[in-house]
Structure formats: structure tokens, C-alpha cells
Amino acid sequence: MIKIYVDGSSIGNPGKSGIGYLIYKENVIIKKESTYLGIQTNNYAEYMALIFSLIESLSINEKKCVVFTDSKLLCEQINGNYKVKSQNIQPLFTLAKKLISKLDSFNIEHIGREKNKEADKLARESTSFLI
């Protein structure tokens, strides 16, 4: 089973946004990614961090994962405890759930920001890219 830490960042909301994620297998980082998304909301970036990491997981044939996020909204929406009200987020929610359905085992957990510093750093760094 792999562990994935995800974060999205938006400087302004909406504003320059990006994602960061790390994938660990047996406590070793096997993937570390930072991607600029353009002008988007923070929630959009949080969802894209999850989506990018799930695509990466499937591409390396890892079908069992636990995702850690400091976004309570993302976690609760994916777990079905909160409704998705934003029309901009609904397609991302649908895509995330479709990707999750391809996994054999999936869990998403909310963690404090202090436990997600590396993904946060990657997400924030991506917003400084000039693309």
C-alpha cells in the first residue's frame, strides 16, 4: 500500500494556483510532484492534487493507497459526508470518484497542516512558476 500526501495552493482565491503531492512506498518517496495550474480557486487546486496523484498511482500500477490531505472539505466530500455544491468542483469530484473506483483499496484522511508541510511546500512553489 502506498501513502500519498496532497495539497493545493491558491495565492488569492481565485489566484495563481498549483499542486504538490508526494507518494511513499514503504516509507520511501517514489514520486514528488509540483505543478502550476493557472488562475484557479484553492478548492480546485486541492481536487487537482488528488486527481494528479491518483492518476500517477494508477500509472505505476499501485492500486492500494491512503491519501492524506489538510483539506477537510476535500476529505469530507470524497467520503460522502459533505455535498459538492460548486458547479466548478462537481466535474472534478466525479473524475476523482471515477479514478478511486479503479483502485482495489482507497482511504482518504484529514490531517493537520503541520503534518502536510512537504506537499504544502511543493504546492506553494508551483505558484511561482511562470508558465
Image (cartoon, rainbow, N blue to C red):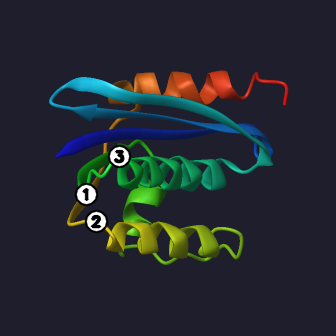
Q: Amino acid at mark 1?
A: Lys
Of callouts 2 and 1, the N-terminal one: 1
Q: Residue at x 66, y 73 (%)?
A: 86
- Residue at the disc numbered 3: 60
Tell which of 39 and 96 is nearer to you.
Answer: 96
The image position of residue 14, as x and y in percent, is: 79, 48
Q: SS class of the residue under badge 2?
A: loop
Circle 3 SS class: loop
Q: Residues within 10 Å of mark 3 (few under 14, many from 20)?
A: few
Label 3 vs label 1, nearer the camera = 3
Q: Marks 2 and 3: in contact by CB < 8 Å? A: no
Q: Position of residue 129 (x, y in %)?
A: 77, 24
Where 130 falls versus 83 (above or below)? above
The residue pinned by badge 2 equals 103
Residue position for label 1: 63
Q: Residue at x 42, y 23 (%)?
A: 117
Q: Is the C terminus in the top left, top right, bottom left or bottom right quadrant?
A: top right
Tell whether label 1 touches label 3 (CB within 8 Å). Answer: no
Amino acid type at mark 3: Ile
Residue 38: image location, x then y, percent: 80, 42
| Contact (Cβ within 8 Å) of mark 2 with mark 1 | yes
Query: Between marks 3 and 2, how big is the CA–CA gap?
Result: 12 Å
Residue at the image position 76 percent from the left and 22 percent from the top: 128
